[in-house]
Amino acid sequence: MTEKPANKDPFVAMVTARADVNLRLSDFHPRSMLLTPVHEVNRPKFPVIDYHNHLDAQEPREVLKIMDECGIEKIVNITMLTGEAALQMIRKYHTASPDRFATYGWMDWSEVQSTGFFQRSVERLERLVERGACGLKIWKDLGTLVKDGDGKLLRIDDERLDPLYEKAAELSVPIMYHIADPDAFFLPIDATNERYEELAAHPEWSYHNSHFGKLELLAQRDRVIEAHPKTTFVGAHVAEHPEDLAYVSKLLDSNPNLYVDIGARCAELGRQPYTAREFFLKYADRILFGTDLIPEVNMYRLHYRFLETRDEYFEYPSHASRQGRWNIYGLFLPDDVLRKVYRENAIRLHARH
Ligand SMILES: [Zn+2]
């Protein structure tokens, strides 16, 4: 009796068959066949403060309508404008509704190469706060793009910025850091990159060839947070490292002056629901609700579904190009945690403003 060659055995053939298809990734939109409970959450269980948004291009009246419909008490507008335009933006939202909007200033790097810049930064912060700003955002151009007077890339932990952080402590306003980006943005845009489509839509978001690698950027930031215990810092986007919540936990453990927001990171948190839920329970006093997305009813409702329900495998709130090809799971956070994350932590940060 002759043995059949292995590849002819029907079972072996079945389990080793592989597809070789040429359907374009952009045309592939699978629909999940799962039938699991669906709980749409139209309004949050408790009032919400959206601590991370950008409203410069929005009309306050229109935003207020969405806020009313979605149970949003207040939005913190992180203006991306600087100088006189930033002061006008503060005024625009303050005039529209002083109780429903607050404004963060944006680090102004103009004239960074001229003498006196670092002292001027301190004065600029004073002016912003005088005019009503409730914090200052420092963006990822620091550490990747901004160069000093000698043409050298400015490090995040450059000590010439120390007086700025000290001034923020004196004025009781937090510094929000958004330095670095998702881990995958630092890798080549290729078939192994989990955010391939997003990077294909925004190739300029790639930091594959950045001077400092991601972990080095985080390390520089972490040194600043540690060196200024009297300054309150907000690590935007789960301190830029939701892919590794053990890292963020350690950072929170060693720095009581640090908070994190969840802006634009439901996708990361919601695909690791067991770890993320534990993280929320443990750091309930340090996590801020934030969206970093254009105010829209469905966007807010997806956040509530994520934080409040135990629904499984549903779409995450996102910008149009999506963040990755996966879905998320609800965290069914208890009421006391929801209250803190939705609102109370943000109130505590701005108790003096
Ligand atoms: Zn943002």
Image: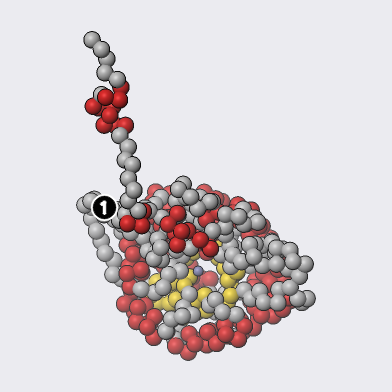
Q: Residue at x 45, y 69 (%)?
A: 292
Give the residue at the far top of this rendering.
1
Q: Residue at x 34, y 48 (%)?
A: 22
In which quadrant will I find the N terminus? top left
In the visual, does 39 lie left or right of 54? left
Examine the rendering and report whether any part of residue 22 can be seen.
Answer: yes
Residue 225 screen position, x and y as percent: 63, 61
Give the residue at the far left of this rendering.
35
In the image, is residue 21 above or below residue 179? above
Q: Which coloring applies here? A: secondary structure
The response on whether ligand 1 sits within 8 Å of label 1 is no
Q: Residue at x 65, y 56 (%)?
A: 211
Q: For mark 1, does the 10 Å Cα neighbourhood hold few (<14), some (14 to 19), or many (20 or more) residues?
A: few
Q: Dot 1 corresponds to which residue?
A: 32
Q: Which image quadrant for residue 108?
A: bottom right
SS at mark 1 in the image? loop
In the visual, does 156 lie left or right of 96? right
In which quadrant will I find the C terminus? bottom right
Q: Which image quadrant for residue 71?
A: bottom left
Residue 313 screen position, x and y as percent: 31, 53
Q: Which image quadrant for residue 115?
A: bottom right
Front position in the image: 20 or 154: 20
Q: Residue at x 46, y 65 (%)?
A: 263
Examine the rendering and report whether any part of residue 334 can be seen.
Answer: no
Front position in the image: 313 or 13: 13
Q: Mark 1 is on which residue type? A: Ser
Front position in the image: 87 or 341: 87
Residue 65 screen position, x and y as percent: 34, 82
In the visual, does 100 lie left or right of 148? left
Residue 350 screen position, x and y as percent: 53, 74
Give the residue at the far bottom of this rendering.
95
